[in-house]
Amino acid sequence: MTRRSLALYVGRRLVALVLLVVVISFVVFSLLYLAPGSPEQILLGARPSTPETVAAIRAEYHLDDPFLVQYWDWARDALQFDFGRSIRTNEPVVDGIRERFWLTLQLGGLAFLITMLLGVPLGVLAALRRRTATDRGVVALSVVGVSAPAFATGILLLYVFAVRLGWFPVFGEGSGVIDRLQHLALPAIALALTGMGLVLKLTRTAVIGSLEQDYVTFARARGIPRRRVLGAYALRNGLVPIVTAAGLLLAYMLAGTVLVEVTFALPGLGSLLVESVRTLDIPMVQALTILIATIVVLVNLLADLVYVAIDPRISFEKAKA
Amino acid sequence: MRLRHPRATRRAARLCAAIAVIVVGAALATVGGASARTDVRSADVQHLTWALGAPIRGLEYTHSADSGTATVVSLGCETLVKYDRIGRLRPALATSFTTPNTLTRIYTIRKNVKFWDGTTLTPEDVVFSLQRAASSKAGSQIAAFYTAVKSIKVQGNRVVIRLKQPDPYFRYAVAVTYILQKKYWQANLKDIGTPQKLTMCTGPHRFTKFQGDGTTELVAFDGYWGGRPAVRSITLKVIVNEATRLLAMRQGEIDGSFRLSQDVIDQWKRLPNTSIQLAPELRTAYLSLDTAVEPWNDVHVRRAVAYSFDKAGLVRAVLRGYGDVAPTMPPPEQWGDVMPQPQVRAFYRTLPKYSYNLTKAKAELAQSGFPDGFKATLPYPDSEQTLGKAALSLSENLKKLGIDLTVKEVPTDAWFATLYNHPSPMGPQIISWGVDYPDPADALHFIYDSKAAVKNNFNTANYKNAQMDRLLAAQQNSVTNAVRANAIRRALRLASVDVPYIPIWYQDIAMGLSTKLRYRGWGTWYLYQPWALDISAR
């Protein structure tokens, strides 16, 4: 793996990202355009209005322009990183996203950390105690975590830990480091439970597979300590699928937090996206989908780079995107 | 709703408190201890945390005209006049208002009212705010209330509004038009009301932070013309999930919330630290029947459906008793000062009842052109599950008449779009109507006027009756209560005979409040006034 091939590889992926963003922005714009209703109807609600008001609002947002003209108006500004103003709230789109981005990052990041810190060790434990009660118990728990919808586990966690035990606050995001951590603990756990099952099972399978390999038997025979066999040999060789899952999970946790946000009253990007789609707030939806697409691509790129770092058999010359 | 008496007493109390403090302070100073001027009253609420059930778009009402926004904006911004508990108009930023003739309204502006930045309110600020509200070109979402206005002008310390034609509802438009500082509005025309710019008003609490889907904060404005507010700071939190709101109240993390849904009121009542207050929401649920197409163009079909609605049962089961059967469209409390309440209720008792009676329903259907029944589809918006339940109940009952009514849930915004676009045929619709102001003709002139059977209007039944139009015009062109009441009564009676719409129920709203607090005089119109002024510590 040379520096040049690394640079080429990353460069290719970033070019692909730009193309992807263009395609997504066009598709999303078309979907919003085709959706029933239009922004001024939603703004006015069930309130009587004069034809002049309707016309004025439509003119303000260029809703009477032809489809491609509307798209080009948006795209031209977006290329200069001017994503316009939200139709719903009138604030600049970039400011609206920035206020919520940090919170979503913290929530997603914390949930991801919990998933990995619990999922991987538990998966290893299940693999080592294969077919015992421990194994079945851990796997069953993870299946429950994956199957239960996030808002249901959220409310349950709230009731047990926030109300009955009083260990955590019920809602909101808090301010200050300790306070924020206290407020995000339960939502992060609720979010983590859905992803943990996947990581756990993948780790279990990977470790079981590795433990059956000849080199592990040979390493044991040579007297290498158990922990090193587990870490350097069994786990490391099984890491590739785990990293894949981790990449997908991280992207999901940054983009798919809406149910947890609604349950715990957290003003994050997930509920912003849902509310913006519901009200046909085109500038905001466009910017958010581009942001999410970028996050997904960058996270996957990171995962691919990690593959190369952990598995010397994979190299950039041979690796496809 | 501020009466003179408490303010005078408060001023006297403040004077006594000041004297007492100076004496005590002097005493402490002589003793050598630090003399801190205490400014905390026993009825003070240091911090009020309130939960909102839905996110808010912005702090500037003409671009964000919905009840949620009004609830928040009213904490800090004021109107010329405000509603009392039963919807009569009272002075606010205007000390008096007169109508020398049917086309003129004069508001005398209160003196020495300060904005949060210390500048004084002038009639120019008032005129500017009213003109912004009236302007369709500026995209005002309440411009429709001002269509009759010819001019708004300053005359000394008064504002004179001239109308093009008589408009009995115009007086309510100023009750929902907030007065902002002209200078601030002009400097921030594009982005007033956003989290970056907030707003500049005269109310008892000043916005310091605004996040429409998260936390909004206000602090007390001690320069308020009505006196020092007892609530010293306010935090509003948006908690959309009902279960979370209930748990937050239980843990004492919030002090209260408005608009609890009927399903959770009983759970809130069981909380030990919470009290519940109820008020009529002035919201009517009704069924709209498209009289332009078959079979709904047959009055016997419409009456048959009316008799098939178990309204009383629905109020018990769906609203959990927090509401009433609706004999006609306007809730009784919506009559404001047009007719006194006892007369309203007496009149409602004389209207044809259409109580649940399948025998009568079958008899009506037999007289119609569709004695063997027919098929139809009734959509309802997913945000109004109570309407869905009512629709399903009706569908079950109609089966017994041989009518196959398919009930369909649709996304709310698509459903709104249908109502706005007024397709042909419109078909039956089930709708929940919240009143705009305390005048019974409010709903009438939207849904019964034949001119409103078009796009962007709400005569979804396509009801076109010349006599109804005449009655509506008669009440519109008069400002005399007796004349209007008479025309409205006749219009409502005609509507009960023709049944283009079937009113189902009136619903109540509930407020949950911490038992540590007292909220005096909460009523239907709380959302258009600085409601934090009515809250104090117990």
Image: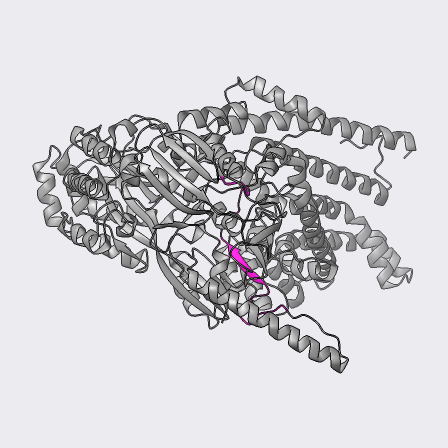
Q: Is residue A253 above or below residue A141?
A: above
In the image, residue B493 lies at what x, y percent?
Answer: 16, 42
Residue occupying the point 32% across, 59% down: B322
In the image, residue A234 lies at what x, y percent?
Answer: 81, 54
Position of A49 with respect to B39 (left or right) is left
Residue B402 visible in the displayed image: no
Give the colouring mode of the picture: one colour
Residue B524 visible in the displayed image: yes
The furthest residue to the bottom: B31
Residue occupying the point 14% across, 35% down: B299
- Which of these two is toward me, A25 or A238? A25
- Which of these two is toward me, B245 or B81? B81
Residue occupying the point 85% across, 58% down: A229
- Which of these two is toward me, B208 or A307? B208
Position of B528 with respect to B287 (left or right) is right
Please tell me in which quadrant of the rendered image residue B230 appears.
Answer: bottom right
Q: Is residue B472 above or below residue B363?
A: above
Q: How many marks?
A: 0
Q: Is residue B203 above or below residue A29?
A: below
In the image, residue A186 lies at what x, y percent?
Answer: 63, 60
Does the magenta stretch mainly form a helix, a strand or a loop?
Answer: loop
The furthest residue to the front: B156
Magenta segment: does it hold B50? yes
In the image, residue B292 lies at what x, y percent?
Answer: 22, 28
Position of A156 with respect to A312 (left or right) is left
Q: Quadrant of the N terminus of chain B?
A: bottom left
Residue occupying the point 46% across, 68% down: B274
**In the image, which residues are magenta?**
B39-61
Magenta segment: does it hold B186? no
Please tell me in which quadrant of the rendered image residue A321 appears.
Answer: top right
